[in-house]
């Protein structure tokens, strides 16, 4: 909503009391009364939309009675916003169209732009992000023409949301930062809180949960002081999602319940449905299936009533997951389905959810549904469809979280911060220059020429010093930004190395080969291991450091897959010293994987006879020593016989990761290669990091 509430600075209850008193004390049917009705309708929009509709009808009738077309258009818009709050989106669209006709005839461009923007919100609430973006763009064009920066910021914020829900995260970040830049300068607390909340949503989708929580808590603090009930409820709901993601179930339920109570008090249908859905998902994970099904099914009904196909798809997927995962007795008593019908029902619901997700154009939702279909097909021993589902899942995952997208986001963040610091430094320097110039002019008047010349030289020396310091600080900031980009680039290259396309392609071919030979047992075994290792690699790659136990688990799954492909041509052994706690010791994810891969394909695959890989983890004072040994053909023979560019690339990326660790932690991390009598030995020395 772009209208500005009356009487700023009052609390919500005081504002309502003041407006009702003003209405009571002004019985005349004139423009003053009409303006009071507008403010009341706006107040009720975020506090009691049903009452807001009644007030809007009064203002429409009064505007028509006194023939005030300008205020009649506002009255139609008031009614539209209240219709939107209770989920009557198409009725809201009709009201906005009536307002646009009046604004256009009178040449009120701002009124037209506001209606376009609010129509965009309606399409957004219907999960039609393409149309939402088009209407937002139409309103932005007019606000730019009018040089209305505050409303431009609001539109940028909404464009960010539409881009984010379309999984276009770099564009979403760009729009949010443009909005944030304007709001920070304008001092509009409520709008600033909205942008902060949306930045939290974006970072949650990028798995940076701590940063997301920080943004949401900042937004809640501002909303609690300046915002409406609606904005407070939204902040509580967003914080609940973060706590849920961080497995703080008690705090998540508390936040969702607070949000639900507020949304029910203001009849916010969409908010109620979202809170019910999130509570249902938590209860499902506890597990409390009765509460879960009750909440999710109620949310599904509300989303269907509002025509929200995106969230309808999400709820169908959650219910499908319940059919797949609940115990047999619950399946019968709660879902009235037999164990034999379980997965058929699961697949049917997922397929319905997928059709809606495709209609709404939500890649992330489609990715999640394909993951669920993969599990359901696998449980049915339908390995052909399971393989197709897993391929589709990976296709969507790669399109959303590819390295280019993340690298671009990192660069844009760094550039934004660097530009901001540069602007501040430049403004400070210009201020000092102006002050220095004023001082020089003053001293020219009161002092003789020689003293003036001397002081001028002195000031010039100071200015030169300031310029030098400014340049030095700017260079330091630039180097810091370049180092951050280097870190982001190296992390992306490391992820690409871990997600070796040849490994994925060969693994999928192996599964297909098992299926074509009707070796369902081997296909199932390989598919299970392959899905586990891929998921662990994707999850671990988002972390700077993970527990040693988790890293070794992923590494062992990778080795087992390669052993299956090579017909158990080699064995392996993983040994961890007794003085190392695998659960609390931290290590960069999959830093040993390139060396193990080299050992298998450049050492053991070419060896005649049985091969062996030994992975040994020991502690040396404040260092962790990770050793990979093989009894393969060795480096000299391997270099003579094969192209080792892939091996050199893995070494180069890992060396870059080690260099970054040394720079960040001022440590002595290193890689040491040794030739054995038979095979190769690699030692990776890392600073010992513990997570207590």
Image: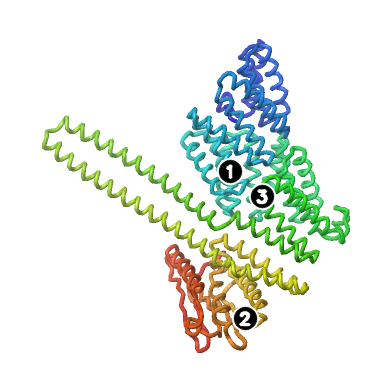
Give the quadrant of the N terminus: top right
Question: Do tag 3 and tag 1 residues touch (Cβ < 8 Å)?
Answer: no
Q: Which mark is residue 198?
A: 1
Image coordinates of residue 589 in percent, x first then y, are 56, 66
Figure disc tally:
3
Question: Do tag 1 and tag 2 residues touch (Cβ < 8 Å)?
Answer: no
- How dense is the environment of label 2, judged by Cα within 10 Å: few (below 14), some, or many (20 and up)? some
For the point 69% across and 29% down, the residue is 92
- How dense is the environment of label 1, judged by Cα within 10 Å: few (below 14), some, or many (20 and up)? many
Query: Could one spot residue 500 in this view of the protein?
Result: yes
- How dense is the environment of label 3, judged by Cα within 10 Å: few (below 14), some, or many (20 and up)? some
Q: In which quarter of the image is residue 555?
A: bottom right
Give the quadrant of the C terminus: bottom right
Q: Which of marks 3 and 2 is nearer the N terminus?
A: 3
Q: Residue 572 carries which label?
A: 2
Q: Which mark is residue 241?
A: none
Q: Name the residue under label 3.
A: 251
């Amino acid at each position: 909503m772009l209208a500005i509430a009356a009487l700023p600075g009052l609390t919500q209850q005081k504002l309502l009391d003041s407006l009702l008193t003003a209405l009571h004390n002004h019985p005349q049917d004139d423009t003053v009364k009409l303006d009071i009705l507008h403010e009341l309708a706006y107040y009720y929009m975020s506090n009691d939309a049903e009452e807001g509709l009644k007030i809007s009808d009064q203002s429409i009738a009064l505007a028509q009675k006194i023939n005030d077309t300008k205020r009649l258009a506002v009255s139609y818009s008031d009614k539209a916003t209240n219709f939107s709050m209770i989920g009557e989106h198409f009725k809201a669209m009709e009201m906005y169209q009536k307002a646009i006709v009046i604004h256009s005839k009178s040449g009120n461009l701002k009124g037209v732009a506001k209606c376009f923007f609010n129509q965009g919100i309606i399409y957004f609430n219907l999960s039609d992000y393409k149309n939402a973006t088009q209407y937002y763009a139409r309103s932005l064009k007019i606000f730019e023409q009018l040089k209305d920066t505050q409303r431009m910021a609001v539109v940028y914020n909404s464009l960010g949301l539409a881009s984010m829900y379309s999984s276009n995260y770099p564009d979403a970040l760009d729009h949010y930062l443009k909005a944030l830049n304007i709001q920070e300068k304008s001092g509009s607390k409520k709008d600033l809180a909205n942008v902060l909340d949306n930045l939290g949503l974006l970072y949650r989708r990028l798995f940076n949960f701590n940063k997301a929580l920080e943004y949401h808590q900042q937004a809640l603090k501002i909303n609690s002081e300046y915002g409406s009930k609606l904005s407070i409820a939204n902040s509580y709901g967003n914080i609940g999602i973060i706590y849920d993601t961080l497995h703080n179930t008690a705090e998540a339920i508390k936040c969702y319940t607070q949000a639900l109570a507020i949304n029910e008090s203001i009849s916010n249908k969409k908010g109620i449905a979202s809170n019910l859905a999130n509570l249902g998902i938590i209860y499902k994970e506890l597990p409390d299936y009765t509460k879960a099904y009750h909440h999710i099914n109620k949310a599904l009904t509300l989303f269907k009533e509002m025509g929200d196909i995106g969230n309808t798809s999400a709820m169908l997927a959650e219910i499908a997951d319940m059919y797949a995962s609940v115990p047999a007795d619950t399946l019968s008593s709660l879902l009235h389905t037999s164990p034999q019908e379980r997965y058929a029902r699961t697949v049917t619901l997922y397929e319905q959810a997928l059709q809606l997700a495709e209609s709404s154009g939500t890649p992330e939702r489609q990715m999640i549904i394909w993951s669920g279909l993969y599990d359901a097909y696998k449980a049915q021993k339908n390995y052909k469809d399971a393989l197709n589902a897993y391929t589709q899942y990976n296709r969507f995952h790669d399109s959303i979280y590819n390295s280019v997208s993340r690298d671009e986001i990192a660069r844009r963040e760094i550039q934004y911060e660097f530009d901001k610091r540069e602007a501040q430094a430049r403004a400070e320097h210009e201020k000092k220059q102006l002050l220095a110039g004023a001082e020089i002019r003053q001293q020219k008047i009161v002092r003789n020429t020689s003293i003036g010349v001397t002081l001028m030289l002195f000031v010039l020396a100071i200015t030169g010093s300031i310029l030098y310091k400014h340049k030095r600080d700017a260079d330091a900031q630039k180097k810091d930004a370049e180092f951050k980009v280097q870190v982001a680039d190296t992390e992306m290259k490391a992820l690409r190395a871990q997600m070796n396309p040849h490994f994925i392609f060969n693994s999928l071919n192996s599964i297909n080969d098992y299926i074509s030979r009707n070796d369902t047992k081997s296909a199932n075994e390989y598919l299970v291991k392959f899905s586990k290792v891929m998921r662990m690699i994707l999850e671990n790659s988002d972390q700077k450091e993970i527990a040693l136990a988790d890293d070794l688990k992923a590494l062992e799954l990778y080795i087992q897959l390669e052993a299956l492909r090579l017909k158990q041509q080699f064995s392996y052994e993983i040994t961890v010293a007794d003085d190392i706690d695998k659960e609390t010791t931290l290590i960069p994810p999959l830093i040993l994987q390139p060396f193990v891969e080299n050992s298998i394909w450049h050492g053991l695959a070419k060896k005649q006879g049985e091969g062996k890989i030994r992975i040994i983890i020991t502690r040396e004072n404040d260092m962790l020593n990770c050793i990979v040994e093989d009894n393969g053909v060795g480096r000299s023979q391997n270099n003579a016989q094969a192209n080792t560019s892939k091996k050199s690339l893995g070494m180069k990326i890992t060396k870059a990761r080690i260099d970054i660790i040394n720079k960040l932690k001022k440590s002595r991390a290193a890689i040491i290669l040794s030739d054995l009598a038979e095979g190769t030995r690699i030692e990776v020395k890392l600073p010992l990091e513990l997570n207590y």
